[in-house]
Image (cartoon, rainbow, N blue to C red):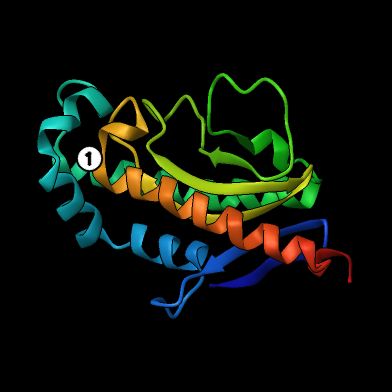
Amino acid sequence: MELMTIFGEKANAVYAIRYPDQDRDELDRLFLLWREYEFVKAYLQERIDLLEDAFGEGISLEEAVSEIIDEVMMLRFVLVKHFDEGTLQQLFMPLRNDDVRLYIFQHSKAKYKSRNIRRPKIRIYAIRLDANCYVITGGGIKLTKAMQECPALRAEITKLDRSEQFLKIMTSVNFFNS
């Protein structure tokens, strides 16, 4: 596991984990994957029974794919914008909806909200280190109400937990203060 810098440095930064079995960090890997029409189409085809709940009635598979790819592009734009403005904690919300305070190593999620998107489906998962410092650990296309209802998203919880342990070791050796 390796920590890659995406933007900024130290406590004012976005980092991403690069897992040993990957040649790219998670943010780069996900944004490349989610922009691939065929990947998104195959993902949705495997979960065709969830489309109506996730998108609303009457959406075609092609429209759903296009909507997801548009959402991905907007989320990338918004991520950069929030970093530049120093407002990442307005984009990244606690993963647990009942978390009422912010704290170090908090599991977080980012999604793009807009009137043009029926219900945000793209999620970026991260660990909060500071107000404007997050470590991207993964992400997914969320078609279910709860993350635990989807096997692919349950795997993201494991990645958050593993990454949290890795980051605790790094902070114990003052990686972010050196």
Q: Residue at x 28, y 30 (%)?
A: 144
Q: Residue at x 32, y 41 (%)?
A: 67
Q: Quadrant of residue 29?
A: bottom left
Work out whether 123 lies above or below 1.
above
Q: Residue at x 11, y 38 (%)?
A: 48
Q: 144 or 82, which lies in front? A: 144
Q: 106 or 116, which lies in front? A: 106
Q: Position of residue 60 (x, y in %)?
A: 14, 36
Determine whether, in the image, residue 158 is placed left or right of residue 3. left
Work out whether 135 lies above or below 157.
below
Q: Residue at x 17, y 31 (%)?
A: 50
Judging from the image, what secondary structure is the residue with disc 1 in? Answer: helix
Q: How many marks?
A: 1
Work out whether 84 lies above or below 15.
above
- Residue denoted by label 1: 63
Q: Residue furthest bottom?
A: 23
Residue 113 is at least partly visible in this image:
yes
Determine whether, in the image, residue 175 is placed left or right of residue 123. right
Q: Position of residue 123 (x, y in %)?
A: 45, 43
Determine whether, in the image, residue 175 is placed left or right of residue 143. right
Determine whether, in the image, residue 46 is placed left or right of residue 160. left
The amino acid marked with disc number 1 is Glu
Answer few, some or many: residues within 10 Å of disc 1's Cα (few below 14, many 20 plus, some between 14 and 19).
few
Residue 9 is at least partly visible in this image:
no
Q: Quadrant of residue 13?
A: bottom right
Q: Residue furthest right?
A: 178
Q: Position of residue 78 (x, y in %)?
A: 61, 45
Q: Quadrant of the C terminus?
A: bottom right
